[in-house]
Amino acid sequence: MIAVELPMKAFYRLLAYARPHRSRLASAFIAMVVYGAASAGLAALIQPIFDEVLPNRSNVAAIAVVIIAVYVIKGVGAYLSSYLMADVGQRVVRDIRNSLFRHILGQSASFFGVRTTGKLMSRIVNDVGQVQHGVSQTLGDLSRESLALIGYVSLLFYYDAQLALLCLTGAPVVVYPLVRFGQRIRRTTRWSQEAVEKITHIGTEAFTGHRIVKAFSAERREAEKFEHASQHLYRTNMKVTSVISVLPPLMELIGGIAFAGALWYGSQEIASGRLTTGEFTAFIAVLFLIYGPARKLSRVNANLQQAIAASERIFEIMDTHSEVVDVPNASVLEPLNEGVEFRDVAFAYRNDSNDATLQDVSFTVPVGKTLAIVGRSGAGKTTLVNLLPRFYDVSSGVILIDGQNIQEVTLESLRSQIGIVTQETVLFDDSVAANIAFGRPGASQKEIELAARVARAHEFISMLPKGYDTFIGERGQLLSGGQRQRLAIARALLRDSPLLILDEATSSLDSESEMLVQDALSALMLDRTCFVIAHRLSTVRRADMIIVLEDGCIVEVGTHDDLLAHGGPYAKLYELQFKDDSSDAASSTSEILR
Ligand SMILES: Nc1ncnc2c1ncn2[C@@H]1O[C@H](COP(=O)(O)OP(=O)(O)OP(=O)(O)O)[C@@H](O)[C@H]1O
Ligand SMILES: [Mg+2]
């Protein structure tokens, strides 16, 4: 039972997307009724042609005109109905695709942690495409051909109810394999979509990582992985095809049997005088005409099953809710003027795991001050700062901005106060200007340029072939590492938010590039409240306060000099991580003088 209920649910959900377009649907339906009536009308002409027009040679011209007129009407009905239905189908698919994209983008970081870009893209492109194929092509066929079928069957009954009934007893023979095949098709389509997803995933990973793939001479391995998945897709697709290809000949065979039966029965009816030759000819002709819609309908079911299989996969994602959302009546966070407080914060990436990534984290950063977070790799530094813009919500404890729990304010007002420069620079395949203005789409060219100047990026941007209009490639790969970082800093500068999160890149740049980035960062941090994950001596020295994280717990708090004098974990970390930053220290003479 469940097996039947579930697909219907997906089907109704698909239909719900058509609701906003119901006026178009209604027009399409009218066009279909016209088409169906015209089809039946044409069939109805057969009998008078055989019984009256041909034997008596009367009204030939008139009937010819009528035939052409009915064909024109039928044609208009067919055109309008398929155009309008396809339009509704395309609109439905467009709406599904848009809401799927919105939905996915709204999910939390943990959602993306377990799903790859390739797989998500596959849902948006391939599964929605499969639905499109099913919906736009078949919805029209379904209703139009059903109507034509109803018209034809009524005619059969009109000619000879008994004979019609006899023919219809064969209907279950037609319907049963259709239903059974439908289930098969749905199942195999699911496999096929999964295989497509895998292919997209392998392709996306290999292409985005093309340098590493080549550097490690893994092209062959990647290609083999792809070919393996490709072969799997081929086989599943052929399974679907083998089922679908059986349908038309099967329908034809069943039609042939019906024809033979009708011939045998009809010859007796004619002999006994209950049926005229014209009536019988018309009956057989209609039987042949039925074959068209019946064959199309058999394919409709197959297509529909494919659409349902794909839509189930879409709805699976739509039903996954991991969004960080506003609480009801969330207030708007006013611009920062006191400070940020973490109070007994604990956080675990998985709800079911006992070992928390962060525990007992409490500290306060007054407005305008800089907090440096230091600790070994994997200590939980990035995790900690990710809680502030609510990429993840705390497992327990609270984070307060000006005394307000950040979970009780709107996400938009919260995030608009926070500028972020991440550990790995993320840029978009767009112009330099658009990348800088990403956080403030309305910014003027002048403002963009000012931000770039302050971020020490203007000089290299002016040397680019098209200056600020140069496209920088996917993830900014046409730029150097230091250039990318300075663009990211310019972006944060233009955003001009009072709170700044800075996850210093661990990869070191050459000293000149490093100096430029450091200069840019100093400009960015000026007059802001900063959370800095520090990997460089110059940054920790500049901080007003340092917290040392170890396994997710704060083990020390203080200034650089205090902590160094104290000889605790920070002093050890200093020996390990910062002391070798001599070039860094030397370049920041101004700091030593300070
Ligand atoms: N998305 C995630 N899902 C599950 N666990 C994660 C996730 N991100 C990080 N972790 C784990 O949480 C711990 C802390 O990671 P985090 O990224 O905060 O370290 P970090 O202090 O920033 O290190 P680094 O200095 O190397 O950047 C690590 O043990 C890591 O394996
Ligand atoms: Mg980190």
Image (cartoon, grey):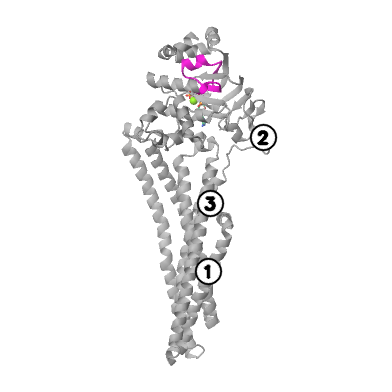
**Of callouts 3 and 1, the N-terminal one:** 1
Relative depth, front residue between 535 and 61: 61
Number of other residues with Cα within 10 Å of mark 3, as a class: few under 14, some 14 to 19, many 20 or more: some
Q: Which is nearer the N-term, disc 2 or disc 1?
A: 1
Of 84 and 156, the residue lying toward us: 84
Verify whether residue 380 appears in magenta. no
In the drawing, does residue 374 fall left or right of residue 239?
right
Distance CA(mark 3)–CA(mark 1): 24 Å
Element type where label 3 sits in the image: helix
Which residue range is magenta in the image?
Answer: 524-551
The residue beneath circle 3 is: 95
Residue drawn 45% across the image and 80% down it: 67
Write the residue at 37% across / 47% down: 230
Q: Which mark is residue 331?
A: 2
Query: Disc 2 to disc 1, how far (Cα)?
Result: 52 Å
Of the residues shown, which amino acid type is indicated by label 3?
A: Asp
Q: Amino acid at mark 1?
A: Ala
Say if mark 3 contacts mark 1, CB within 8 Å: no
x and y percentages locating residue 382 in the rendered image:
52, 26
Residue 94 in the image: above or below residue 546: below
- State the residue at coordinates (56%, 19%): 371
Whether the residues at callouts 2 and 1 have beta carbons within 8 Å, the answer is no
Residue 31 circle label: 1
**The stretch drawn in magenta includes residue 544:** yes
Q: Position of residue 95 (x, y in %)?
A: 53, 51
Disc assigned to residue 179: none
Relative to 287, say whether 509 is above or below: above
